[in-house]
Image (cartoon, rainbow, N blue to C red):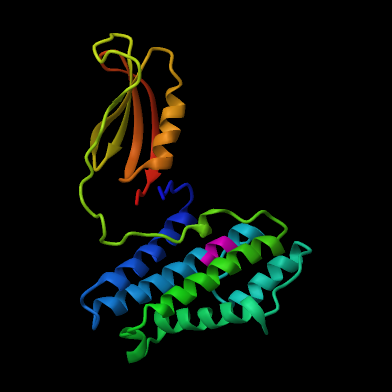
Amino acid sequence: MSKNITTPIYHIWTDALHFRALASQTYNKDWNRGTYIRWGIISAWTAFEMACQDAVGFDRLGNRFKDKLNYALKENNCDQPNWGEGIWQKVGKVYELRKSLVHSPSREDLRPTSVERLDEAIEILRDAITEIYLLAKSDPPRWQLDDKDEGWVNQHDYVNVTVLRGVDHKDTRRIEVVYISKGKECLSEVLPPDSDYKAAIESIKMNALCSISAFRVYQGDGELIYEEEASIRGV
């Protein structure tokens, strides 16, 4: 799926997915795998903590996380998690694991061999993200449903294809929709005058295979008529 990164929380979440993919694919299982697993667990927890802050409208939940989260929910007249069972008991275990990785990693923490450890943490925190928004009486976001990253697979240059939609590319009134990838302009579509170029941009966002940092729309022979920043990770 194309990853249109619209929030910092989603950005960190995709980091965790990327580290999980790298941990699975690396040939260096003695050193690199442990690095990717640790980074993945830390990134997944960071995204979860940011989601909690967003859900309850309370900053800096890091120290004494459980107490502060309980307090924030109480202040909002919301139910508090049951930390003794179910998903929240599992969250507590991930929290302790994250603390050990950051503050006092053991030799086992430094060189884990099982990617399932990271995969389990991601699954637990994905469910907990949904739960915290429900407790806070808000609609859960959709970004945490993203569970895919290609890692090193398909990490190559993509060939750009330009689509002409019922217009001559020499038409002096034509509209050209361009995206910026790796600092270069790539012409995606050439449209007739007065076309809905924003719809074309939305279509590119949904189907992008490469990273995109901006969109530009030109009229005729180079008149810039629209520009939009983007943060699309691609696949």
Q: Residue furthest top?
A: 172
Q: Would you place residue 178 above or below residue 146 in this image?
A: above
Q: Is residue 215 left or right of residue 53?
A: left
Is residue 49 located in the magenta-colored stretch of the structure?
yes
Q: Nearer the viewer, residue 233 or 95?
A: 233
Magenta residues (range) = 48-52
The residue at 48%/70% (across/down) is 122
Residue 13 percent coordinates (x, y): 45, 61
Q: Looking at the image, which residue is at 25% across and 80% down? A: 29
Instruction: Tell me which residue sits at (37%, 69%) in the image.
Output: 20
**Residue 198 percent across, percent down from the top left:** 45, 27
Q: Is residue 15 magenta?
A: no
Residue located at (21% from left, 40% from top): 159
Q: Nearer the viewer, residue 135 or 206?
A: 206
Residue 75: x %, y % from top left: 75, 65
Q: Quadrant of residue 65?
A: bottom right
Above/below status of 174 relative to 217: above
Quarter of the image for residue 83 reads bottom right
Q: Residue furthest bottom?
A: 107
Classify residue 202 by image quadrant.
Answer: top left
What's the magenta bit mostly, secondary-structure-wise? helix
Residue at the outermost right position = 77
Q: Is residue 117 left or right of residue 172?
A: right
Give how far across and how far down residue 9 sits, in percent: 49, 57
